[in-house]
C-alpha cells in the first residue's frame, strides 16, 4: 500500500492515511486476536489504526503497535491511532486522532 498517495493533510501539517485498519472483533473472539491482527495489518502496510473504547481491546492493540515499533517494523511517528468514545451528549461518537508519539 502506497500511503503517500492516499493520505489527508491535518491542520498541524501531518498527513494521515485515509484507509485505517479497523480493530473491532466479536465478543466471542479472544482479545489476543486483536493483537495478532493488528501486527499483521502493520506488516501489510497499514499505518492508520482505528479503534474505539467500546471495543474493549485498546490495550491489546497498543501492545501490537508497541511490538512493531520495538522490532523496527515501523517508527513511532509513522503510526496514527484513531479512536471513538461513546456516548457524547448528542448521542454521536467523538473521534480522537493523533500520531502515536
Image (cartoon, rainbow, N blue to C red):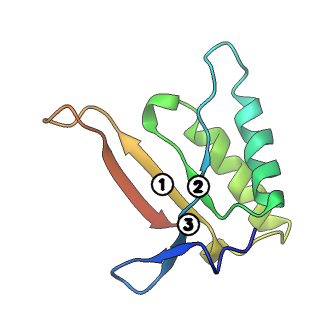
What residue does disc 1 label?
A: 82
Q: Secondary structure at mark 2?
A: loop
* Dot in front, 3 or 1: 1
Question: Quadrant where the N terminus lies?
Answer: bottom right
Mark number for residue 100? 3
> As drawn, which residue projects farthest toward the bottom?
13
> Can you give x and y, in whole percent of width and height, for residue 8 in the image?
47, 75
**Disc 3 packing (10 Å; few <14; some 14–19; many ≥20):** some
Q: Residue at x 42, y 60 (%)?
A: 97
* Dot in front, 1 or 2: 2
- Foreground of the two, 10 or 18: 18
In terms of sequence position, does the residue under pointer 1 or pointer 2 come before the other? 2
What residue does disc 2 label?
A: 20
Question: Quadrant where the C terminus lies?
Answer: bottom right
**Disc 2 packing (10 Å; few <14; some 14–19; many ≥20):** some
Q: Residue at x 76, y 31 (%)?
A: 33
Q: Residue at x 71, y 75 (%)?
A: 75
Q: Quadrant of residue 36?
A: top right
Q: Residue at x 52, y 30 (%)?
A: 55
Horizontal side of residue 78 vs 82, given as left or right: right
- Asked whether the residues under the numbered discs 1 and 2 touch, taking CB atoms below 8 Å apart as contact, a structural biologist would say yes
Q: Secondary structure at mark 1?
A: strand
- Asked whether the residues under the numbered discs 3 and 1 touch, taking CB atoms below 8 Å apart as contact, a structural biologist would say no
In terms of sequence position, does the residue under pointer 2 or pointer 3 come before the other? 2
Amino acid at each position: 500500500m502506497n500511503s503517500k498517495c492516499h493520505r489527508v493533510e491535518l491542520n498541524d501539517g501531518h498527513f494521515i492515511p485515509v484507509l485505517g485498519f479497523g480493530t473491532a472483533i466479536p465478543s466471542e473472539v479472544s482479545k489476543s486476536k486483536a493483537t495478532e491482527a493488528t501486527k499483521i495489518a502493520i506488516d501489510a502496510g497499514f499505518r492508520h489504526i482505528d479503534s474505539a473504547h467500546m471495543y474493549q481491546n485498546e490495550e491489546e492493540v497498543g501492545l501490537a503497535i508497541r511490538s512493531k515499533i520495538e522490532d523496527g517494523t515501523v517508527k513511532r511517528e509513522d503510526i496514527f491511532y484513531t479512536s471513538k468514545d461513546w456516548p457524547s451528549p448528542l448521542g454521536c461518537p467523538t473521534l480522537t486522532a493523533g500520531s502515536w508519539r
